[in-house]
Amino acid sequence: MTALSLIIAVTVGVVAGVTGRMLLRRGRTVPLWLPIAAGVAAAVLATVLSRMANTDRPGPTLTEILLQVLFAVAGVAVVAVTADQAPTGTR
């Protein structure tokens, strides 16, 4: 993984996390850092997987950036769906 790929992954993750956090403000009690952390972690995971699949490219590719965006959005969506649920079946 190159430094540029890591910088792009963190940037994509932060943008996706902040956007997701802005959309979650209505009626959800999700910590500020959680969607951002999920977005960054998912984008870095996408970079690692992309680099494992295509190791002959020196810099970031369009496919890698698209995977980062898709993974980051999916990570933030998972946080949005699961973070504010009350436990079921408690007495």
Image (cartoon, rainbow, N blue to C red):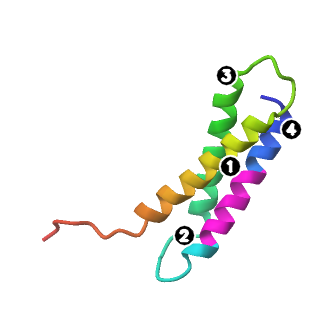
Asked if one can make out residue 63 in the rendered structure from this viewpoint, the answer is yes
Q: Quadrant of residue 90?
A: bottom left
Q: Kindly give the residue lying farthest to the bottom in the view shown.
A: 26
Q: Quadrant of residue 16?
A: bottom right
Q: Is residue 38 above or below residue 17?
A: above
Whether residue 25 sits left or right of residue 2 in the image: it is left
* Amino acid type of the residue that numbered disc 1 sits on in the rendered structure: Val
Which residue was labeled with disc 2? 31
* Amino acid type of the residue that numbered disc 4 sits on in the rendered structure: Leu
Report the Cα–Cα distance between label 1 and label 2: 22 Å
Q: Could you tell me which secondary element the residue under label 4 belongs to? A: helix
Which residue was labeled with disc 1? 69
Which residue was labeled with disc 4? 4
The part of the chain drawn in magenta is: 11-21
Report the Cα–Cα distance between label 2 and label 4: 29 Å
Question: Can residue 58 be found in the magenta stretch?
Answer: no
* Amino acid type of the residue that numbered disc 3 sits on in the rendered structure: Met
